[in-house]
Amino acid sequence: MKWLITTQKCDLSEGLADLLAAEGCRLDRDEPPIPLGEDEQVIEVEGPVDLPDRLAHNALILKVSPSSDLTLY
């Protein structure tokens, strides 16, 4: 399943990528995080269906939302 994860702004090399991998996520490291203002960023990952529950304990993770493919009309 694809997920959008909103986090506090940080470098993926600062342990975030390792945290996500440990929770069963696959992260495309070629895609940079999408900045949201000064303090937040969004990354897209593929992960298990219970990912929001798995990441609920981590203060760095602000929100986990399902992602869907973009459809152009």
Image (spheres, rainbow, N blue to C red):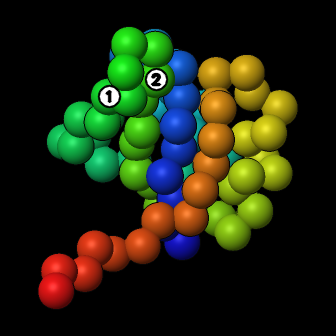
Mark 2: which secondary structure?
strand
In the figure, 21 relative to 25: above or below?
above
Numbered marks: total: 2
In the figure, 66 relative to 73: above or below?
above
Within-10-Å neighbours for mark 1: few <14, some 14–19, many 20+: some
Q: Amino acid at mark 2?
A: Glu
Residue at horizontal 81%, vertical 51%?
Answer: 53
Tag 1 residue: 35
Residue at horizontal 24%, vertical 35%?
Answer: 32
Find the distance from the CA under tag 1 to the CA under tag 2. 6 Å
Which quadrant does the C terminus fall into? bottom left
Q: Is residue 44 visible?
A: yes
Check the image and name the residue furthest to the bottom.
73
Q: Is residue 57 left or right of residue 5?
A: right
Rendered image: mark on residue 17: none
Q: Specify the quadrant of the image occupied by residue 55.
A: top right
Within-10-Å neighbours for mark 2: few <14, some 14–19, many 20+: some
Which of disc 2 and disc 1 is earlier in sequence? Answer: 1
Residue at horizontal 69%, vertical 69%?
Answer: 49
Mark 1: which secondary structure?
strand
Tag 2 residue: 40
Labels 1 and 2 touching (C-beta < 8 A): yes
Task: Return the x and y of residue 25 as percentages of the image width and height.
Answer: 54, 52
Residue at horizontal 37%, vertical 21%?
Answer: 37
Q: Amino acid at mark 1?
A: Pro
In the figure, 73 relative to 23: above or below?
below
Task: Return the x and y of residue 30 as percentages of the image width and height.
Answer: 19, 42
In the figure, 39 relative to 32: above or below?
above
Which quadrant does the N terminus fall into? bottom right
Q: Nearer the viewer, residue 72 or 44?
A: 72
Q: Is residue 48 left or right of residue 8?
A: right
Q: Is residue 22 visible?
A: no
